[in-house]
Amino acid sequence: MRGLGCAPGTWRVSSHSEGSSQVTCVEVVWRARNRISVRDSTRRAETALVFPPWEWAALVRLAHSG
């Protein structure tokens, strides 16, 4: 998942977060075995959603298409 723009295991903050404080946003990370995890930055201790690459790509395409 090179498209995430970061090294595996590094959480990436959404570029659409509110202001510079990044209080409410979504974070994404590329995990081992090509899994993508997504979490709410305000609830980091809770379980993240996990997607295989093809599902994540489909979700991103749908989000971009409106």
Image: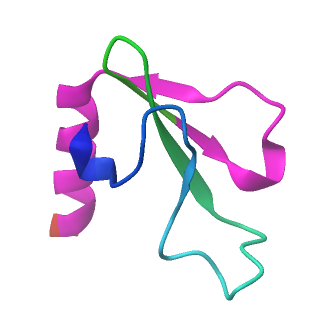
Corner quadrant of residue 63 = bottom left
Q: Looking at this view, name the residue that lies furthest to the top.
A: 33
Image x and y of residue 50, in percent: 47, 23
Q: Is residue 55 above or below residue 59?
A: above
Q: Residue 26, relative to residue 9: is it above or below?
A: below
Q: Is residue 48 left or right of residue 42?
A: left
Q: How many marks?
A: 0
Q: Relative to 54, say whether 57 is above or below.
A: below
Q: Quadrant where the N terminus lies?
A: top left
Q: Which residues are magenta?
A: 38-64
Judged from this view, the residue extending furthest toward the bottom is 19
In the rendered structure, does residue 43 fall within the stretch colored magenta? yes
- Color theme of the render: rainbow
Q: Going 59% across and 75% down the picture, which residue do you hit?
A: 17
**Screen quadrant of the C terminus:** bottom left
Residue sitting at x 54%, y 28%: 49
Residue 4 position in % (x across, y down): 33, 50
Q: Position of residue 38 (x, y in %)?
A: 53, 39
| Nearest the eye: 16 or 9 | 9
Name which quarter of the figure residue 19 lies in.
bottom right
Q: Is residue 15 left or right of residue 48?
A: left
Q: Position of residue 11 (x, y in %)?
A: 57, 46
Q: Nearer the viewer, residue 32 or 27?
A: 32
Residue 15 is a magenta residue: no
Query: Splitting the image into 4 quarters, where does residue 48 fall?
Result: top right
The image shows residue 19, relative to residue 24, as above or below, that is below
In the image: residue 2, left or right of residue 23: left
